[in-house]
Amino acid sequence: MYGPLRDIFSQVLDYPPADVDIDVTGEGGRPDLTVRAPSGLLDLSGSQVKISWIVVEAKDESGVFADPETREEVFALKAKYIGTHTAWFVMVDPTVFIARRVGTRMQSSDR
């Protein structure tokens, strides 16, 4: 499942393939996928500093993330993957693709 997800981020959403990592340890553990993006900063050698912009948790079981309660339970367990600069936490199973913004207030749809 990780390979096709990597391909969605690189071939559909146009992130450079080198910036989409499968199962690589990050700030808070080892998310299934990490999508890195430029931070706008340079390191001492003048190279672009990349940040973990998107972290992905994937499950093989259908419907795991379709249920809001289960989704919140998994998010609570896996939120450790969210780093200082992470903007999105994505949850994917064979039936749903949920992109959850982190670090900002949620706005009500009735306003």
Image (cartoon, grey):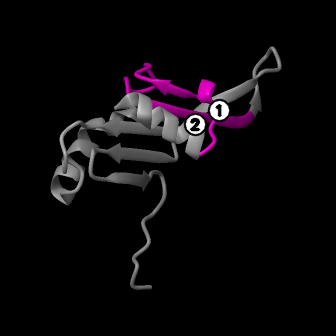
Amino acid at the residue labelled 2: Ser
Q: Quadrant of the N terminus?
A: top left
Q: In which quarter of the image is the C terminus?
A: bottom left
Residue 51 in the image: x percent, y percent?
60, 32
> Does the magenta portion include 107?
no
Q: In which quarter of the image is residue 85?
A: top right
Residue 68, relative to residue 77: is it above or below?
A: below
Check disc 1 and report the residue beneath it: 16
Q: Which of marks 1 and 2 is nearer the N terminus?
A: 2
Instruction: Report the disc number at residue 49.
Output: none
Check disc 2 and report the residue beneath it: 10
Q: Do the residues labelled 1 and 2 touch (CB within 8 Å)?
A: yes
Residue drawn at the location 47% of the way across and 47% of the way down: 88
Magenta stretch, residue numbers: 13-40
Residue drawn at the location 42% of the way across and 28% of the way down: 3
Q: Residues within 10 Å of mark 1 (few under 14, many from 20)?
A: few
